[in-house]
Structures are given as C-alpha cells and as structure tokens.
Image (spheres, rainbow, N blue to C red):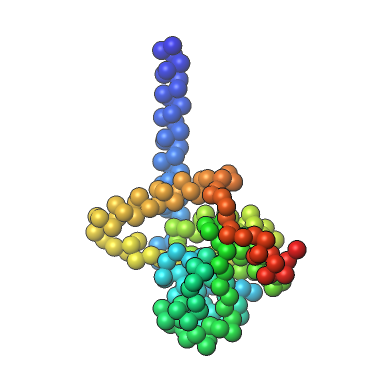
Amino acid sequence: MVFIACAVGAVVAALLVALLAGFGVFVASLARESGPLPPPADGIVVLTGGADRITDATILLTEQRSRRLLITGVHRDTTLAEISRTVPATEKALSCCTELGRFALNTRGNAIEAAVWARANGFHSLIVVTSAWHMPRALVELRRAMPEIALVPYPVIARSQREPNWQSRLATGRLLFAEYVKFLAAYVGIGPWPALASETELLRRSGAS
C-alpha cells in the first residue's frame, strides 16, 4: 500500500511539473509587443471580447489589409453604428465591408461562424485578430474548423500586459493560467457546448447547405 501511495504521489507530482512547465512555455510564446501590419489576406476575422480587438481590426480594414471584415460574437442588439462610435472608422467606412456575426457563444462558435463566412465568400486566407493571450486557443479552434484556409495571426496586446504594478501582474497571471487550461482542453477537442445560438440559422443565412 505504501508503494502504491508513493507511486501515485510521484505520478501526480510529475503531472504538476509538466503542467507548470507547459504553462511557462505557453506564457513565453505569447506576443508582448505589437508587430508590423500583416500581409494582405482575403478576409479579416476579429473575435469579440476586448475593445482593442475591434479597434485593431478596423484599422487593418482601413489600411487595406483586406476588403472584408467579420466581427464574430457580437451581441444580437449591438449595431454597426454603435461599434463605429468606439473605433477610428466611420459607420460609412465600415458598412460596405463589415459583417456582424451574432451566432457564436464562445471561441469554438467563433471558429465555426468564421469558417462558414470564409467558405461562403470563397476565401483562402484570413487575418485573425484577438488578444495575444487568446490567440493560441483561437487558432486551435479555427484550424480545426477550416483546415484548408491559411490563417495569419495578428495578436492584440492588452493594456494589462503592459502594467508594471503587482496587482495587475497577479490578475494577468490568473487570467493566463485559466486560458492555458482552456487551451489544453481545446487542443484535445474538449470545449463548451453549445457553440452557436443556432447553427441551422447560421447556415441558412450564409447560403451553405
């Protein structure tokens, strides 16, 4: 019995070490500074969840990195006019080229919604805009949903990542560890369900079968 208890303890300790080591690699891989503008692509998809994400995505649109933008995960009552008041682009500039995705309930739903949109438009490449800490999980879900489409990540650096005080660093550490666990779950195919408010309605509106 003592041997079994020691063996179980050793396995648990090894798993904890592996988990923490993986977390260190995960954090080290995250972008910490804004990079150059990405090369042009067929479309841009931004996953909602932070104001800076939509701002950066609309800048890419106005910089002509693509002609089409999908904002996925938008609340059903939010309008393009409301969004335009929070970003450096007018409603007129956005209305020609921006679509609001209202069906996604989570990151997996974002990926499905983006895949349906990209295929309906015949796109072969997408610029992906989301927070730097969210990007690894977003790419896992997006690649699973549309493996045939090239994805160009454009990570957004959250203000909290630039804060020097310990309170912000502690909050960021908790956020990153929670995201790391979600990333591992997504990597092995585990995720929240349902992913969409209505998959049937999404496919109908996109013209997909």
Q: Nearer the viewer, residue 117 or 193?
A: 193
Residue 81, visible in the rendered structure = yes
Residue 119, visible in the rendered structure = no
Picture quadrant of residue 16: top left
The residue sitting at 42% across, 71% down in the picture is 52
The residue sitting at 41% across, 70% down in the picture is 51
Give percent across and percent down for residue 57. 50, 74
Residue farthest along the right direction in this orientation: 209
Height in image: 5 above or below 50?
above
Give percent across and percent down for residue 93. 53, 86
Give percent across and percent down for residue 107. 53, 57
The residue sitting at 56% across, 50% down in the picture is 193
Q: Is residue 188 left or right of residue 173?
A: right
Height in image: 1 above or below 167?
above
Residue farthest along the top direction in this orientation: 1
The residue sitting at 58% across, 58% down in the picture is 196
Q: Nearer the viewer, residue 50 or 206?
A: 206
Height in image: 121 above or below 148?
below
Picture quadrant of residue 141: bottom right
Q: Say which quadrant the C terminus sits in.
A: bottom right
